[in-house]
Amino acid sequence: MMTTIGKTLLETKTMTKRNLWKSVKNPDRLMENIIAPIMTMLIFVFVLGGAMSQTTEVSYVNYIVPGTLLLCIGQCSTASAAGISTDIQKGIVDRFRSMPIANASFLNGHVIESVIRTVFSVLLILIVAFFVGFRPDASLSSWLLAIFLLLLSTVMITWISVVYGLMIKGPDGAGSLTMFIMLFTYLSSGFIPTDTLPKVLRIFAENQPMTAIVEAVRRLLLNQPLEDYYFTAIIWCVGLLGVAILLAIRLYKNKVQ
């Protein structure tokens, strides 16, 4: 059993290196993942910040950084859908089937590469945020809890992206998932308080996973009362992650049969 596990881990490492190399050779995707969230943050801070600051109790840049980080995570993670769909369309998966490679290594390689790429992008977003006035007031334990939740959110959204990549007919359809993730992020408390939204949108915003994640990260970084947001965010992430993994495994088995 240990030999099988070790072999799968080695194959996963190889697949991860392959996907990282593909990302390096495709800097347009990496730049898009980084530039879009940064530009969103700068537009909200410098163009809309004056008006929007009246709706928040804290500095507006402090308010929107958690939402911007989640937007970055969503945009970076959903790139996995295009990568997986491309591999399937080009017959790479069929080629792997002819080799003694564990099925899990192919999916895990895409997930781990996406997480590494996303972490890099999030770090750059944070650096830019500090330059434009982001001033968190978090303890070390709060930072660790926030980082753990952001990593869990990254893994969760990445596996959802894997499911989507296995469902769509071609990589061109992957962009629709990005729009879907952006919609959930904008219709949350990421950029404006939910009580400023119309009633129907407010009900949706207050009861969807992005708001729980954003609120938990924001309250941790700004040293505000956490209430039950962190627990709710963990439940959302773990639940969606479990469903996504099960669906991904089933869909991939159907693809390779």
Image: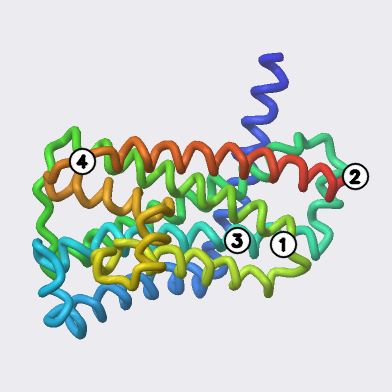
Q: In the rendered view, would you say 141 is above or below 20?
A: above
| Secondary structure type for disc 4 | loop
Residue 90 coordinates in the image, percent (x, y): 80, 64
Q: Is residue 141 left or right of residue 28?
A: left
Of discs 4 and 2, which sits in the foreground?
4
- As drawn, the label of residue 257 is 2
- As drawn, the label of residue 62 is none
Residue at the (46%, 60%) spot, across then down: 74
The amino acid on which the numbered mark 3 sits, given as a three-letter code, is Lys
Count of number-bearing discs: 4
| Label 1 sits on residue | 85
- In this rendered view, identify the residue nearer to me: 49 or 205: 205
Q: In the rendered view, would you say 201 is above or below 225?
A: below
Precedes in sequence: disc 1 or disc 2: 1
Alpha-carbon distance for marks 1 and 2? 16 Å
- In this rendered view, identify the residue nearer to me: 74 or 107: 74
Q: Is residue 203 left or right of residue 53?
A: right
The amino acid on which the numbered mark 4 sits, given as a three-letter code, is Leu
Give yes or no for contact between labels 4 and 2 (Cβ–Cβ under 8 Å): no
Precedes in sequence: disc 2 or disc 3: 3
| Secondary structure type for disc 1 | helix
- As drawn, the label of residue 22 is 3
Q: How packed is label 1: few (under 14 Cα within 10 Å), some, or many (20 or more)? A: many
Residue at the (62%, 44%) spot, across then down: 244
Q: How packed is label 4: few (under 14 Cα within 10 Å), some, or many (20 or more)? A: some
- As drawn, the label of residue 226 is 4
| Secondary structure type for disc 3 | helix
The amino acid on which the numbered mark 1 sits, given as a three-letter code, is Ser
Residue 188 coordinates in the image, percent (x, y): 35, 62
Give yes or no for contact between labels 3 and 1 (Cβ–Cβ under 8 Å): no
Precedes in sequence: disc 4 or disc 2: 4
